């Protein structure tokens, strides 16, 4: 539930401004529009900071053993940059390194643009920089290339000693190169103190590349029926009634971890039914929850009360995150435990223990106060559970731990090979493998922040469940084809490991398209509590809720209405249109191109036509609809979807940006400061001013809250929208065609704006 940071593959050098031009390849400028966040933070549970942040992207689903970054060859060079001929030579990694370094000394930033791969070159602003200080220039020219690592003849890492390089001599420069059309071009640099550190970095990069390829590549399936059959056969023989499956697991293991995606009524109803089973209390003595441990006395009071009174639980839930945790199905679960306890002898009653980090908002008066409670939440939860198990060792019953699935994983590793140290990992380390059992819940491909980018295994799992009539089931992952599939549930956790290495079992309760977001607890947002939320927001963000534009009035009804736009509603990002078709797995890594309904590449008969390139290309990716013009981003002013970038877009009158791949894994054209309403594709020509205004009125209030709205092409083409620009112009826009697999990707659209009445 906390934010996460990570160290990317394109690194930042730590040196002066002038030298940054040579070694800093700018961070991603083409960040996609963030989908409007749900008002609850994490969906699957945040984990400890990874060794390398993993970008999202299209996934592949062959077994991990099938992926390879090719054989690696390593050779020594031991030549200085000055020892190479003074000419441009990009035919070998070492010659390219020398060429690029010479050019950088002579040309500065122009060389960085000229000799970098296209997506990196596009991020480097045009212009000149002050001449390099003599000591830095000499350091570059005297750099000794120690060795070169090459794999697949497409990727190379050059390690060079930067002799007499400024204030820190004898640093090791690890330069990444990629072969593009026969030439080795720059991908980025990082400096290290020792050769061992640089070599380790090369190994990490290679492991990362192998994992990335495993997810990004995949052939089309020649015989879909034969490919699917083992999955269906496995379910026929191994899938069990989910309640009995979990009860059996609880009987065999000291701790069963039920991974979850937060705010799913269907899954909380399953948990409640599990508790109501007569077998449950005979096998389980304690339920651990991912909730703030400082409020344990409130839960103890609730469970001990002879009369059902939810107020202590509600008070506790109000401490979770800044806006509280107003999840009615979770409150219903608490009530179920209380009701079951009323029928049990006191010695057999269930305990609920809150295991997560403390969030004592009453004690937080300024932003710095929050820092004292920041912990490694996975380790914190595991240690709380271990202490509680030891304290109540006399109770021989087992434990159920309900937590975001990212906290539940047992033995997955990052692309670089380091373990993902989840709460489940820590528990397994202390209690041993046989005493901990982890269950993975069915869901979409989703980040911790809630961005959805498709179906697991490109819909292969959903297809198998549909073949079984979509009946609820649970089945093992330690054997069979499901457990062998690459773990692709979270794009931020890039791994080469299969599902079976992270979890023992899989829980499926029904199609994703049928699910809703948990409804709000009635009365949760009282006027008094909303004033407290305003205080919290001022502490964390520096201004109040009204000033931030979250609500118009500081009262419970206004805040509940704001939350109610998502809570208790169908999950639009889990709709069939957004998740994509079940059979995408048949088409391999280019499934979107293969399945997209394409229009003939002929000019539209009505409307103004324009083409936009992907923002990361650095080409004409931005559109001003009023003028009918397209332009490339000025990367000195526009560095991504942030307040500064959006201000520049507004200044230039930019309405549209094209994204071949947004941060959320979407594809399409984003409208900035724009209201959009999807309309019938066949009505582009027929739609007039009145029709457009009516369509926009239906989405007005919700649509205007997001700085950018993605007009997605994931479900097919064409897609058509009624639009209102920030300048107040209304019209109709249709994305006709998209060539995503091309480099750079390009979108063709047509639009018409109506004369204002």
Image: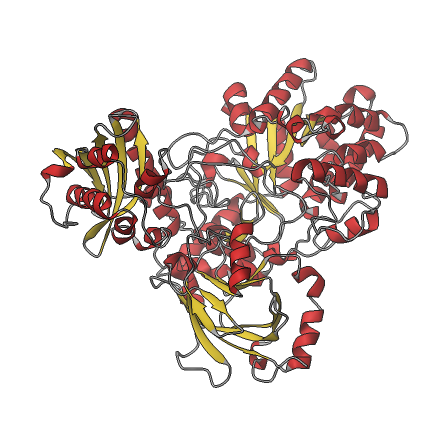
Above or below — where is 536 with respect to 212? above
**Toward the viewer: 556 or 85?**
85
Measuring 60% from the left and 85% from the top, which residue is drawn there? 686
Q: Position of residue 414 (x, y in %)?
A: 42, 35
Quick one: 482 or 593, which is closer to the camera? 593
Is 632 displayed left or right of 316 in the figure? Answer: left
**Residue 574 rendering spot, x and y as whole percentages:** 60, 56
User: Residue 277 versus residue 418: which sits nearer the camera?
Assistant: 418
Relative horizontal placement of residue 165, taking residue 217 as reference (left or right): left
The picture quadrant where one finds residue 630 is bottom left
Q: Is residue 299 above or below residue 683?
A: above
Residue 642 appears anywhere in the view: no
Q: Is residue 688 visible?
A: yes
Tell me residue 446's x, y (percent).
54, 48
Name the quadrant containing residue 536: top right
Image quarter where the C terminus lies is: bottom right
Which quadrant: the N terminus?
Answer: top right
Residue 197 against residue 682 in the figure, above or below: above
């Amino acid at each position: 539930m906390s934010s996460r940071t990570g160290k990317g593959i394109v690194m930042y050098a730590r040196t002066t401004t002038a030298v940054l031009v040579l070694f800093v390849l700018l961070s991603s400028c083409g960040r996609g529009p963030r989908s409007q966040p749900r008002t609850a933070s994490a969906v699957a549970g945040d984990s400890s900071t990874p060794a390398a942040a993993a970008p999202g992207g299209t996934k592949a689903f062959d077994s991990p053993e099938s992926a390879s970054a090719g054989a690696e060859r390593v050779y020594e060079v031991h030549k200085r940059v000055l020892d190479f001929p003074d000419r441009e030579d990009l035919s070998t990694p070492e010659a390219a390194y020398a060429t690029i370094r010479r050019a950088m000394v002579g040309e500065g930033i122009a060389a960085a643009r000229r000799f970098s791969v296209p997506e990196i070159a596009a991020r480097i602003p045009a212009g000149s920089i002050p001449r390099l200080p003599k000591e830095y220039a000499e350091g570059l020219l005297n750099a000794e290339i120690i060795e070169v690592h090459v794999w697949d003849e497409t990727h190379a890492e050059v390690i060079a000693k930067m002799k007499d390089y400024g204030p820190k001599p004898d640093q090791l420069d690890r330069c990444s190169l990629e072969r593009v059309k026969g030439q080795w071009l720059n991908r980025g640099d990082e400096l290290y103190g020792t050769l061992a550190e640089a070599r380790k970095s090369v190994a990490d990069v290679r492991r990362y590349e192998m994992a990335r390829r495993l997810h990004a590549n995949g052939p089309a399936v020649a015989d879909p029926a034969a490919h699917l059959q083992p999955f269906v056969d496995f379910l026929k023989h191994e899938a069990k009634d989910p309640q009995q499956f979990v009860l059996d697991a609880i009987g065999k293991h000291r701790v069963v971890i039920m991974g979850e995606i937060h705010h799913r009524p269907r899954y909380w109803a399953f948990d409640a039914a599990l508790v109501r089973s007569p077998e449950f209390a005979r096998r389980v003595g304690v339920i651990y929850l991912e909730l703030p441990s400082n409020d344990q006395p409130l839960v103890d009071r609730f469970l001990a009360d002879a009369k059902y009174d939810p107020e202590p639980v509600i008070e506790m839930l109000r401490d979770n995150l800044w806006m509280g945790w107003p999840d009615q199905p979770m409150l219903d679960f608490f009530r179920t435990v209380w009701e079951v306890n009323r029928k049990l002898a006191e010695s057999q009653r269930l305990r609920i223990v809150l295991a997560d980090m403390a969030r004592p908002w009453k004690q937080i008066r300024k932003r710095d106060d929050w820092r004292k409670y920041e912990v490694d939440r996975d380790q914190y939860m595991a240690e709380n559970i271990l202490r509680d198990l030891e304290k109540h060792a006399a109770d021989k019953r087992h434990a159920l731990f309900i937590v975001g699935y990212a906290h539940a994983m047992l033995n997955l590793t990052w692309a670089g090979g380091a373990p993902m140290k989840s709460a489940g990992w820590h528990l397994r380390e202390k209690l041993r493998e046989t005493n901990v059992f982890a269950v993975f819940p069915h869901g979409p491909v989703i980040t911790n922040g809630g961005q959805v980018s498709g179906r697991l295994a490109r819909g292969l799992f959903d297809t198998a469940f549909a073949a079984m009539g979509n009946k609820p089931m649970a089945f093992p992952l330690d054997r069979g084809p499901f457990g062998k599939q690459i773990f692709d549930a979270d794009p931020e956790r890039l791994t080469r490991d299969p599902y079976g290495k992270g979890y023992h079992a899989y829980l499926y309760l029904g199609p994703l398209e049928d699910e809703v977001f948990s409804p709000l607890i009635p009365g949760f947002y009282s006027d008094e509590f909303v004033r407290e939320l305003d205080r919290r927001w001022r502490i964390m963000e520096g201004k109040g809720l009204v000033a931030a534009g979250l609500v118009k009035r500081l009262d419970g009804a206004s805040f509940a209405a704001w939350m109610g736009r998502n809570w208790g509603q169908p999950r639009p990002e889990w709709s069939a249109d957004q998740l994509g078709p079940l059979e995408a797995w048949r088409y391999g890594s280019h499934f979107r191109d293969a399945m997209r309904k394409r229009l003939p590449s002929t000019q539209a008969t009505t409307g103004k036509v324009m083409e936009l390139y992907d923002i990361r290309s650095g080409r004409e990716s931005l559109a001003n609809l009023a003028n009918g013009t397209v332009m490339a981003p000025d990367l000195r002013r526009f560095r991504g979807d942030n307040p500064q970038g959006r201000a520049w877009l507004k200044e230039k009158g930019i309405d549209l940006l094209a994204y071949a791949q947004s941060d959320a894994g979407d594809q399409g054209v984003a409208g900035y400061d724009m209201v959009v309403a999807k309309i019938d594709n066949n009505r582009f020509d027929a739609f007039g001013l009145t029709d457009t205004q009516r369509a926009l009125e239906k989405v007005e209030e919700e649509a205007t809250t997001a700085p950018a709205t993605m007009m997605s092409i994931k479900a097919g083409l064409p897609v058509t929208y009624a639009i209102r620009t920030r300048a107040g112009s209304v019209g109709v826009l249709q994305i006709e065609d998209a060539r995503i697999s091309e480099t750079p990707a390009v979108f063709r659209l047509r639009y018409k704006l109506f004369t204002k009445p």
